Image (cartoon, rainbow, N blue to C red):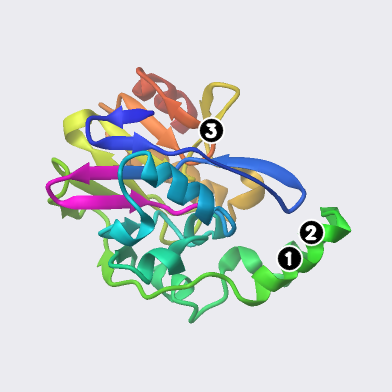
Amino acid sequence: MQLFPGAEILELPMQGFGGTSVVHPVLLMGEEGATLVDTGFPGQGAALDTALQAHGLTMAEIDRVILTHQDIDHIGNLPALAAGRATVLAHSAEAPYIEGRERLLKFNPERMQRMLERMPEAAQAQFRNLMSNPPKAQVDVLLEDGEELPLYGGIRIIHTPGHTPGHISLYFPKHRTLISGDAMRVVNGQLEGPGPEVTPDMDLAHASLAKVPKDVEYILCYHGGLFGPGAARRLAEIAG
């Protein structure tokens, strides 16, 4: 599905860890080469490669990866991409976690134990292995709030912390379109704020929504997909 000319929404389904998930990385294509925004869960590599092949690419041909944040469903296939020619970009506050120098914030022992208790026994060993050896790769370029990337007509980096400390959203002013990562979700067709159960600082996450430009028309959420046109009206409602 096209987000705007040169930007394709990928849909990666996954069955595992006791449930089914669909996530939505974005493939950007143009004279600047190919950029992937977020990479899916571990185990979605084959699905990602198939999605890229539909656009004439392989993982080895991705030039850069922009990560909205450190969570496992966003960095899951990062090592394979970084092993090719991809340059990795992320907010400076996320780099220690993505590089494996710090434990992923959501991988705290108490939360992991609760998740394990809800999983079928067959999935627990797989999850324990993932916890002990999460994906990691070097972050080559550190991004900061307000930075403008001269790619694909212009990308504005918006620091939207709360879900994680260095969470970013990507705004494309030319297309009035936001890639929100996990700063927002689409639930039953409606735009909502981040999930409280996976957002350590809901107050900060809510405050971050006020940083989104007021002229936004479309918002692409990693969980739930595309919302719009008219995203600004709904954003004003949930941001207060």
**Residue designated by label 2:** 123
Q: x, y percentage for residue 228?
A: 39, 21
Disc nearer the start of the sequence (3/1): 1
Residue at 73% over, 54% down? 17
Helix, strand or loop: magenta stretch: strand
Q: Secondary structure at mark 2?
A: helix
Q: Is residue 135 above or below residue 74?
A: below
Q: Nearer the viewer, residue 157 or 24?
A: 24
Crowding near the residue tagged with mark 3, few <14, some 14–19, many ≥20 C-alpha atoms within 10 Å: many
Q: Is residue 219 visible?
A: yes
Q: Is residue 104 above or below residue 171?
A: below
Crowding near the residue tagged with mark 1, few <14, some 14–19, many ≥20 C-alpha atoms within 10 Å: few
**Residue designated by label 3:** 224
Residue at 34% over, 71% down? 139
Q: Magenta region: which residues?
A: 28-40
Marks 3, 2: nearer the viewer:
2
Specify the quadrant that holds the N terminus.
top left
* Image position of 113 (left or right of 154): right
Instruction: Name the kind of residue labelled 3 in the image.
Output: Gly
- Residue 99 is inside the magenta segment: no
Instruction: Name the kind of residue labelled 2 in the image.
Output: Ala
Residue at 71% over, 51% down? 16
Q: Is residue 77 above or below residue 104?
A: above
